[in-house]
Image (spheres, rainbow, N blue to C red):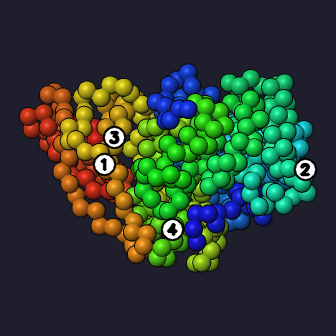
């Protein structure tokens, strides 16, 4: 399977400016967009399998994961009691996909009333309207792009008749990630979109920080976001790694995916993406040859993959951490193009430095993990700090002490993320 085989999200009912630094004025979404944990979301299908018949386990694992933002589709038949339960017990919030294939605009407004606007962060327009599934529908026969633009205009008119942008932003329609030319066909919806949705899948199982076309976040922003609405705030509403592994295809093994996912979330946040929705939470099936069955953070039997554990540990380690421009107390001293870092501060204002190497951990041709050697990386440390605490989310919540000598701490780095903070 190649990435080009991916489905439209709704199929079968299951569903300018290059990167700009984040700024508070650019964010249309409610809540503190400088808070890292607020930038992480995941795609789900609450009313479909395997979620529907395993709801309690889904709820427990979602709550434990630390992920608080879900992306799901609006269907009038959804069991809204379950949606409310997720919010009331675990503070889950929803980005809701709407489509003329599943709901009318009056049904959408009634749905918002029934669910409660306080549980909704945003409404998102038609998902991948250029997919074969959507284009095959009778309603798309007048021209799929005309239908998408007209529907976005109707949704916008209805929302703004009752809610402000700050209360309920409207996210753009999306197109298939390998069809940038289709953006021009729906550009008429730009004036009815408060932010832009992109699906920034890597096409050939590359590392999250790749600079390749049809893979790099910067490429998608230039060719998808800016071609639609230049410089607009952007959300990645689908991104992930398929775990079907065969030589030469675009799948990634579970261990390597577990290393890539924290880097992907941190890299998107570092580059200004407002929210990143992983595709998806739970594997849709068990067929080893069906790529669509193996995108989840959980296997189909509900057991967590390494990606789930890594993301959970990352969110625990960075709970309450916010972006900061002050990185004077902890700085990366080693010069290397492969080194990436993110300066944060915890809820008490103490510095946190997240560091990783943008190295490939999966050999696509051989379909096997790459053994990335440890390399020493020097961190310049303020003279008042005697030692650092290092935590690797891929290794759980444990930590080790790193001494500071003459203002330098030397840490070992392979392909995994390292989180550094002054030792208490």
Q: Which mark is residue 251?
A: 4
User: Which of disc 4 and disc 3 is earlier in sequence?
Assistant: 4
Residue depicted at 62% across the width and 53% down the height: 177
User: Which of disc 2 and disc 1 is earlier in sequence?
Assistant: 2
Q: Nearer the viewer, mark 3 or mark 2?
A: 2
Q: Where is residue 113 drawn, in percent x and y?
A: 82, 35
User: Which residue is label 3 attached to?
Assistant: 341
User: Which residue is label 2 attached to?
Assistant: 142
- Of residue 120 and residue 367, the one placed in the foreground of this image is 367
Q: Which mark is residue 338?
A: 1
Residue depicted at 18% across the width and 51% down the height: 376
Dot 2 lies on which element?
A: loop
Residue 335 visible within the image = yes
Q: Count the marks: how many?
A: 4
- Of residue 251 and residue 422, the one placed in the foreground of this image is 251
Q: Is residue 326 above or below residue 103?
A: above
Left or right, 287 with reference to 168: left
Mark 3 vs mark 2, CA separation in Å: 48 Å
Q: Is residue 138 above or below residue 98?
A: below
Q: Where is residue 258 drawn, in percent x and y?
A: 43, 60
Dot 3 lies on which element?
A: strand
């Amino acid at each position: 399977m190649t990435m080009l085989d991916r489905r439209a999200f709704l199929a079968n009912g299951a569903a300018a400016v290059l990167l700009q630094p984040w700024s508070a004025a650019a964010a249309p979404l409610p809540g503190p967009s400088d808070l890292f944990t607020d930038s992480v979301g995941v795609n789900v299908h609450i009313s479909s399998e395997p979620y529907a018949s395993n709801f309690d386990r889904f709820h427990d694992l979602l709550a434990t994961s630390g992920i608080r933002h879900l992306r799901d589709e609006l269907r009038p038949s959804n069991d809204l009691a379950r949606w409310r339960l997720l919010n009331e017990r675990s503070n889950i919030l929803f980005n809701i996909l709407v489509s003329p294939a599943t709901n009318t605009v009056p049904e959408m407004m009634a749905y918002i009333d029934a669910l409660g606007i306080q549980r909704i962060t945003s409404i998102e327009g038609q998902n991948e309207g250029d997919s074969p599934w959507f284009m095959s529908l009778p309603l798309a026969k007048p021209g799929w792009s005309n239908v998408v633009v007209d529907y976005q205009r109707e949704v916008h008119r209805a929302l703004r008749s009752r809610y402000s942008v700050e209360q309920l932003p409207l996210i753009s329609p999306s197109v298939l990630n390998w069809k940038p030319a289709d953006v021009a066909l729906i550009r008429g919806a730009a004036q009815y979109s408060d932010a832009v949705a992109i699906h920034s899948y890597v096409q050939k199982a590359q590392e999250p920080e790749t600079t390749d076309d049809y893979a790099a976040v910067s490429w998608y922003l230039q060719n998808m976001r800016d071609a639609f609405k230049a410089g607009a705030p952007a959300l990645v509403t689908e991104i992930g790694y398929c775990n079907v592994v065969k030589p030469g295809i675009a799948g990634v093994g579970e261990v390597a995916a577990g290393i890539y996912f924290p880097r992907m979330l941190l890299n998107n946040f570092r580059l200004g993406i407002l929210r990143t929705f992983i595709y998806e939470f739970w594997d849709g099936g068990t067929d080893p040859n069906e790529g669509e069955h193996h995108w989840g953070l959980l296997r189909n039997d509900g057991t967590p993959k390494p990606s789930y554990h890594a993301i959970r540990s990352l969110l625990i380690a960075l709970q309450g951490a916010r972006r900061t421009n002050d990185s004077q107390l902890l700085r990366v001293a080693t010069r290397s193009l492969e080194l990436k870092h993110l300066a944060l501060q915890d809820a008490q204002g103490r510095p946190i430095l997240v560091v990783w190497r943008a190295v490939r951990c999966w050999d696509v041709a051989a379909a096997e993990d790459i053994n990335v050697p440890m390399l020493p990386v020097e961190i310049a440390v303020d003279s008042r700090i005697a030692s650092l605490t290092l935590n690797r989310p891929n290794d759980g919540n444990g930590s080790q002490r790193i001494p500071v000598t003459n203002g330098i701490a030397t840490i070992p780095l392979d392909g995994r993320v390292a989180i550094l903070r002054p030792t208490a």
